[in-house]
Amino acid sequence: MSSPAHIRSHESVFVRDSPRTAALYLRGSREGFAQAREFTQRTLDCWSLERCTDDALTVVTELAANAVLHALPHASTDEFPVRLRLTLRRAHLVCAVTDPSDSLPVHARTADALLEHGRGLHIVEALSDHWGWTRRAPVGKTVWAMLPTRPCPDPDPVSHT
């Protein structure tokens, strides 16, 4: 089994009025997932999206794991690293991972609870409003998930006093 991503020493954060975007480049080693989660945590803290943190960390970890485990073994990471990109839109946080593989993500029809692998995209689907992928030119793809950023409505509208 391949080790998770190692993150290059540079990260780029672009802040615009709308949308706000932050990006981080990954390579294949064990420390990368921790750094991707720390990067996501810091970015969401800066954007005052603490309520989205748990779901975003899970989605980022799953998308990055798929890229590192399935795309990097077949590509030169020096030429085309894996990139994590977070984009804040009006009602959604978009978590996107770009990798050098042309192979589309495999979304297993059924998730066997006893299997070690194959449940990641089911988790992404459960936590996101929408998810999908986009082919990149000349090579690669971006797998993305849109997480809602608005607070959930209070199920009990009666005021508590």
Image (cartoon, rainbow, N blue to C red):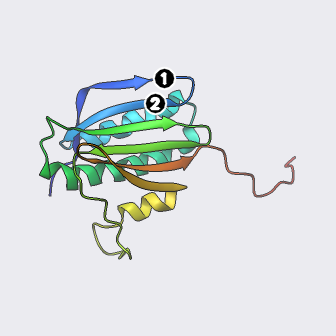
Residue 128 in sight from this viewpoint: no
Could you say whether the residue bearing mark 2 is in a helix, strand or loop? strand
Task: Decide which of 157, 122 is in the foreground and name it.
Answer: 122
**Residue contact at pointers 1 and 2, CB within 8 angstroms:** yes
Residue sitting at x 21%, y 56% = 70
Instruction: Name the residue beneath numbered marker 1.
Output: 15
Mark closest to the chain's N terminus, 1 or 2: 1
Q: With 1 as the anchor, is 93 left or right in this view? A: right
Which mark is drawn over residue 153?
none
Q: Quadrant of the N terminus?
A: bottom left
Seen in the picture, residue 115 relative to 91 is either above or below; the reply is below
Task: Decide which of 143, 8 is in the foreground and name it.
Answer: 143
Seen in the picture, residue 156 relative to 78 is either above or below; the reply is below
Residue sitting at x 25%, y 37% = 26
Instruction: Name the residue beneath numbered marker 2.
Output: 21
Could you say whether the residue bearing mark 1 is in a helix, strand or loop? loop
Instruction: Give the amino acid type for the residue marked by disc 2 in the picture.
Output: Thr
Crowd rating for badge 1 (residues with CA inside 10 Å; few <14, some 14–19, many 20+): few
Residue 82 in sight from this viewpoint: yes
Please give the count of numbered marks on the rendered protein: 2
Q: With 157 as the anchor, is 133 left or right in this view? A: left
- Image coords of residue 116 (percent x, y): 27, 68
Instruction: Give the amino acid type for the residue marked by disc 1 in the picture.
Output: Val
Task: Decide which of 139, 152 is in the foreground and name it.
Answer: 139
- Image coords of residue 128 (percent x, y): 51, 55
Query: What is the spatial separation of the Cα atoms under label 1 and label 2, in whole angstroms?
Result: 6 Å
Residue sitting at x 66%, y 45% = 151
- Image coords of residue 8 (percent x, y): 22, 30
- Image coords of residue 110 (percent x, y): 38, 76
